[in-house]
Image (cartoon, rainbow, N blue to C red):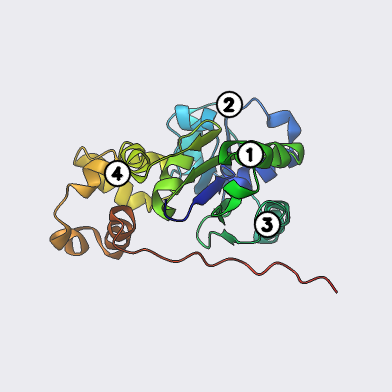
Amino acid sequence: HTGRLACIHVPALPLQLLVRRHPEWIDRPVAVVDEDKPQGKVLWVNERAYRSRVLPGTRYAAGLSLCRRLCAGEIHEDEVDQGVRQLLELLWRFSPEVEPSVDEPGVFWVNASGLGRIEMSLGEWARRLRAELEGDGFTARVVVGFSRFATYATARITRDITVFDTADAERRSAMGVRLDRLHIDPALRVALHKLGIHTIGKFLELPPDGLGKRFGAAAVNFYKEASGQSRKPLLPAPPPIPV
């Protein structure tokens, strides 16, 4: 096999940090907003809010009209950075090469190549990793596969752990992922929704030539990533060197 890569997704990390601050919200629909006002914009939602169709990009007042029990609050950037750092330190116990996502706090890619020689199996390694994060109070999903984009897309929908044995199975899984499950530009998501395009597979059926003109640069970049045209190498954060 080619190199193995794992994607660890701590769903809506800012949201998990907010719920840690308000444990009484654990069973409620919750959103993180950019400001705690009716016109504040929803940035992150949990599963209960998502099921009520409260999506990122919605105004807080509109979210409340869709879901009366919605709880919302702000999370500052420093708190999120601190959360990412805490997760990085936990993940370094499982692999020296961990790359945190620049765009989406709570998403990490981990080099899992060669771990099969140390671990009983990659599935076992993923289970231990997930248990460690949960022990620290973080809900996490782990996908072990081959490519950056496909592991990320599957991590958005998997319940807990998925290990792919072949790149084909990984790709098939990614093609079925709905666009509203991904952290993509809300305007692009709405435009595609109007055309009846709801999954990654359907999006990749669009002719790439007119994408930029019709939907802008965000769509072109997303197309390159989803189709595998832009293959970025892993850029691990350097672990601290002990004195």
Q: Which residue is mark 4?
A: 200
Q: Which residue is mark 3?
A: 88
Tell me the distance, in whole angstroms, between the alpha carbons under discs 3 and 4. Answer: 29 Å
Q: Counting residues from the N terminus, which is met first, the one under dot 3 or under dot 4?
A: 3
Q: What amino acid type is highlighted by mark number 4?
A: Ile
Tell me the distance, in whole angstroms, between the alpha carbons under discs 2 and 4. Answer: 31 Å
Q: Counting residues from the N terminus, which is met first, the one under dot 1 or under dot 4?
A: 1
Can you tell which of label 1 and label 4 is closer to the viewer? 1
Q: Which percent across, then down, holds residue 39?
A: 50, 48
Tell me the distance, in whole angstroms, between the alpha carbons under discs 2 and 1. Answer: 45 Å
In the displayed structure image, the side of residue 200 where residue 57 appears, left or right = right
Q: Which mark is residue 69?
A: 2
User: Residue drawn 55% across and 45% down?
Assistant: 9
Tell me the distance, in whole angstroms, between the alpha carbons under discs 2 and 3. Answer: 34 Å
Q: Quadrant of residue 236?
A: bottom right
Q: Counting residues from the N terminus, which is met first, the one under dot 2 or under dot 4?
A: 2
Please, what secondary structure does the residue beneath circle 4 have? helix
Q: Which percent across, then down, holds residue 243?
A: 86, 74
Q: Which residue is mark 1?
A: 120
Q: What amino acid type is highlighted by mark number 1?
A: Met
Q: Counting residues from the N terminus, which is met first, the one under dot 1 or under dot 3?
A: 3
Residue 194, can we see it? yes
In the displayed structure image, the side of residue 192 where residue 28 appears, left or right = right
